[in-house]
Image (cartoon, rainbow, N blue to C red):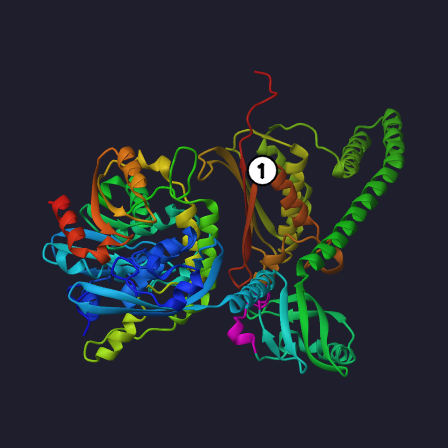
Amino acid sequence: MLDAEGEISAANPAFCRLLGLVESSTIERNFRDLLPRGVRLFYDAQFIPTLLLRGALSEIAFDLKHADGSHIPVLINARVDYTGPAHHQILLAVFAVEQRRLYEKELLRARKEFEQIAEVVRRSSDAILRLTAEGMIQSWNAGAQQIFGLSSEAAIGEPLSSLLLTAHTESLSSAMKMLKRGQETSIEARGRSASGNQMDLAVSMTPHMEAPGILVAFSAIIRDITGRKMAERALLQNEKLASVGRLASSIAHEINNPLEAVTNLLYLLQLRVADEETNSLVTKAQRELDRVAHIAAHTLRFHKQSSDRTQVDLHSVAGSVLALYQVRFENSGISVINDSLNASPFLFFEGELRQILFNLVSNAFDSMRAGGRLVLRCRDVALYPSGRRGMRITVADTGSGMGRDTLRQVFEPFFSTKGIGGTGLGMWITKDLVQKNEGTIRIRSCDCFGRSGTIVTMLFPNQPQQGQPT
Amino acid sequence: MRSGLHGQIIQPTRMFFQFETMDFRVVPKTAMDALRRNNVKVVGSGEQLIMFAHGYGCDQNMWRPVLPSFSDKYTAILFDYVGSGLSDSSAFDQTRYSTLRGYARDVLEILAALKVERPINFVGHSVSSMIGALASIEEPGQFETLTMIGPSPHYINEGNYFGGFERSDIDSLLDSLESNHVAWSAAMAPVIMGNSERPELAQELEASFCRMDPFLAHHFARVTFLSDNRDDLSRVDTRTLILQCQSDAIANLRVGQYVHKWLKNSELVIMDAKGHCPHMSDPAAVVREIRRFLQ
């Protein structure tokens, strides 16, 4: 029995024997002094306030100090007794629980260990599931939630097969057969998340057997390998691209030798020509041949570093690109506007700009086989939000336009709408070149009948004038 | 009927009705979260504001004995720290609450959520003294005064500093908490809120006082007893009252004197009461001192 301040006002002989104390010396001691210091913290901070508020507490574990210095684990039931206004005393019943405490300690330790392992499972980024022998989901962790976008409430009780596409039912059932025989097994399958996305999954399953050889449950570890699969596909595509590049360079290389021979022959031919008309034909042939040489050289440089930026007169570059198509434009009834006279000279890789414009103009032409209008416009602008000076180049046509699906894939390599005639590389290269010049490219397009067309807008920031003579 | 201990028993419903009538429509969602998270209750309608912050080991109910004495002039703000009382344990974030600063942030978020317009008087018991100090360093304008009941900036002895405990003592406290996991879990069962028509429900409520999520109690104990906020004391500018019990096993007299020495603007009152919770064991004396200080 304790008074309001915790002084022991009465104690029975059993209590004194428990602590190895003489009965008379027990009285008037504060109960707090019988506690090891750390336990005192618990007593003062948690036990006493709670006891005073609740009026009673039961089976609270304490350690008491024995007279010989050892600690005795006890359980205490406590009750507050109100003897009058502003007076109360505390009644304690104390039981020694040495064996029980040891057992509890062991239980606690085991539980902690279990919780740590459970935590590993819970937080794993792989889905780790427990399943019944019939394949019904019994547990669901954070990884599973992440991969499938399903809460545990929604998933538990559902069959494992519901996570996979129906195409895999067979491989799953043969996996189940192996599990029943006690064999571990793993499959690769495509699954579906709650939002409808499909993904590649690696599922490895481990049986839990009980004697005599009965499958009672199994576990499945499911890993989302969509990223890995995508990387594999990208690698494959890269390899394809690289081989195309190698092929192009080797063709260009092979063309170079006869080209040089023809150039020399034309030169010799020109020396022998006397009349004016023939001479101008040869000059024309030479000019066209120069262009072939230039293209071949450019193809060879495809993977090499471009030469320096130069001040480019956009009007003349745009004009020369449009000139390549002039005859074809006229034949198809396409009117062309080159609106770039007012653009300031711009520091650029000229060859690359030419290629960008060439790709866009040729796409525009392909979309306007039945005639139309093409506008190529260059304007000085201030870029948003940096306010930096820059150049906006727009290529707009009134051609057949593109649908949403086409538009989404337009920059993907090997994506083409031109059937056998297209490589599917033009826009991909264009985007690459634009980005290399720190520009951005945007396409708006509509394939609705009557108002179809495409507008490609590119923005390039001004380059600082380094390396230029001042 | 028990009536002796607290002098006056507060009907549980009285503590909650004010909360119901407050207009929360204009409070943004995050602010609502703070009020729900910390189970904030606003009691009374006095002009001045007083915020009571419980210490480790209990919840806002520990202020019941002193609360009625402030209802004339003050509006009292009560709350539970995350993991204590009826707070939302799911709001627990190990990193945020790994130092007392996280708990201090909760205090400031509660004030923001309540759209408190004038500086408040903060009364903190035990670890809340330091939480209040940290909050006042963060936003001094929000605090008119601090009252610290049994404060300690550091519980562990270190060099010349006498905190009263060794590291091993704290470990043994944590052991005690673990051994009592089950006893405290039992009280975590869902509670039916008070209904004054049916006194047996009030009793049920009583049985839930000082609920603590056992896991979070362990965490709060670690943060409380292993923190060292000695360096923060000198950064507090708010006028402070330190209530120190003559014999307090948790925060001893020397610790109280240490706090007084380092707080620029503080008054130390040594009370006759014994133990660590004078506001529960001798509420009248605590009320007297706080009211005098706030005058």
Q: Residue at x 65, y 40 (%)?
A: A321
Q: Position of residue B279 (x, y in %)?
A: 22, 55
Amino acid found under the numbered disc labelled 1:
Glu
Residue A147 highlighted magenta (yes or no): yes
Task: State the residue at coordinates (25%, 33%).
Answer: B264
Left or right relative to B164: residue A112 = right
| Residue position marked by numbered label 1 in the rendering | A438
B43 with respect to B55 (left or right):
left
Q: What segment is highlighted magenta in the picture?
A: A141-156
> Where in the figure is residue A357, as x and y percent of width and height?
63, 42
Please give left or right for residue A212 compared with residue B58 in the image: right
Q: As displayed, is residue A441 above or below residue A148?
A: above
Q: Residue A51 colored magenta?
A: no
Q: Is residue A403 shown to the viewer in this render?
A: no
Which residue corresponds to the image point at 59% horizontal and 79% vertical from the top-left? Answer: A158
Q: Main secondary structure of the magenta part?
A: helix
Identify which residue, A40 or B132, lies in the foreground: A40
Closer-to-camera residue (A366/B97): B97
